[in-house]
Image (spheres, grey):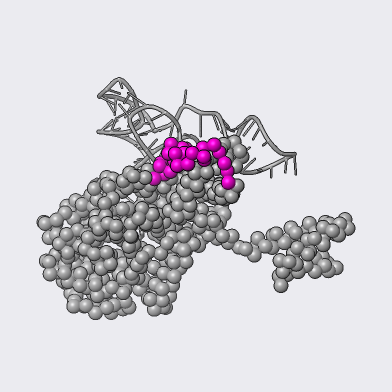
Amino acid sequence: MENQLLIHNTITRRKERFEPINPPFAGMYVCGPTVYGDPHLGHARPAITFDMIFRYLQHLGYKVRYVRNITDVGHLVADLDDGDDKIAKKARVEQLEPMEIAQYYADRYFVYMDALNVKRPSIEPRASGHIIEQILMVQQILDAGFGYEVNGSVYFDVEKYSTKYEYGKLSGRVLDDLISNTRALEGTEEKRHSSDFALWKKAQPEHIMRWPSPWSDGFPGWHIECSAMSTKYLGKYFDIHGGGMDLLFPHHESEIAQCQAAIGHESVKYWLHNNMITINGQKMGKSLGNFITLDEFFTGTHPSLQQAYGPMTIRFFILQAHYRSTLDFSNEALQAADKGLKKLMAASETLNKLIQNEVQSPVSETGQEALTGSPIFDLSNSIYAAMNDDFNSPMVIANLFEGVRIINSVADKKETISVNDLKLLKNIFNTFLFDILGLRYEKSNDQRELLDGLMHLVIAIRQNSRETKDWGTSDQIRDALQKLNIIVKDEKEGSTWNIE
RNA sequence: GGUUUCGUGGCCGAGUGGCUAGGCAGCGGUCUGCAAAACCGUGUACAGCGGUUCGACUCCGCUCGAAACCUCCA
């Protein structure tokens, strides 16, 4: 437990000791969803990954401020398009106010994140609520000489920036390569260089999301919101910035450049990136048409799903892989995850019963000494070691399964455990399984179905006893049900029941 | 083409220069009225070819294969 937390920093490509800038405080910013569509499996991975990190940092005693934005403006469809953004486009198609779209999908996002037991971040700022901050930051970049205005739009001057700083340090890109490889794009005539990116875009007349600015009525570019909001809520230099690996370039690369230009120094100490989820080895994405929404998972309605998978199964499935590895989806893998999770949860229940039974063993008499060097103590140590090694949740889970083995063996009276070890084991399960991995008992998604099934069974058993004139059993069932406010009526066609 | 990452037993997935990952599935057993669960046992896995080394799945090189990013995407 004494060992240090190591986290993999994308920008240095190595594991580094986590040393917060202002302990005991820790600031974490994670790129959240663009709310223009239903949340899918891809949204679940960063949400769950950084939720686990959030929970673990809190467990270690840090006072964490976790900021995750909601993008409700500003992500351009493409420069080659008409400068429209996703939400506005969808709004036109569906004849709705853009904010209706954003609100609807933001609400959906929260519902599904809640189902996945993802804790709400400390602050969830919306891009549309921070236009002023974004305009200010664009102005700072202009003042510093790293931006230029053309026809009411403002662009970041990557070429000029590169003469002083290194654009591409995060993603390992070289500017010359970028320039020679982006020539094919159209609609970039306003820019001085093809690698420049928009800080502010003038709105076309038909564009419905727009705000006044010193340059034009328009909307912010798609990187500036994260720079503006992270600076506002976490300061000019903060600890962790996270997001999906696909955001590395150009999004995070550009954030670095914007902060460097506007503030005069970089703003992030540790960059963390989760890897992608693949389906049949291919990235899941809208453009590929192979993405599965969380709703489809929970209801089992997607054609490629053999059954419905509960939120906890999804969460466990994701945590069974290291966050920096790609994770391949398949029914087989999810079914395995489902079974494994059930085994873990069942053992956890068994563990609670063991405690009630006050298991005794000779070791318990010796008190504290029993803890050090015991198998449970070793287990605890290796779980902390795994978490401290860049949040190695698969290793944590493997160790919990070792705990499962011990729990079941003790329950079978094949092994003994000291009272102290039992306390420690329970503590481990509470802390890691529930608090940090964030797993919980799955609520039955359809209580009514369960009730109907049970009642069908009870009525059938009672019917058997009535046919054999076993009135004792038949009355016992009816009276017991009555106490539960379930009234059984025997009619000619058979028995019916209803809840009072 | 460039950047980055990866290739582990039937499936999913950790990890390490020499010592059991783990889960699911399979097989054999114990237990059990039956079934399930549980427990025990069980697999010459590390893409291929070279090199470094006393020793490599682990380090280096090459080959083959895959993916992500370079254009909106978690």
Q: Residue furthest right?
A: A469
Q: x%, y% of residue A359?
A: 57, 43
Q: Which quadrant holds residue B71?
A: bottom left
Residue interval drawn in magenta: A358-384
Q: How many marks?
A: 0
- Residue found 20% across the figure and 52% down from its top: A169
Image quadrant where one finds the C terminus of chain A: bottom right
A269 or A244, nearer to the observer: A269
Q: Is residue A434 above or below residue A190?
A: above
Most common secondary structure along the magenta stretch: helix
For the N terminus of chain A, give its image quadrant.
top left
Q: Is residue A321 above or below residue A287?
A: above
Q: Residue at x 34, y 67 (%)?
A: A123
Q: Is residue A206 left or right of residue A104?
A: left
What residue is rendered at 47% in x and 59% in y? A116
Residue A310 visible in the snapshot: yes
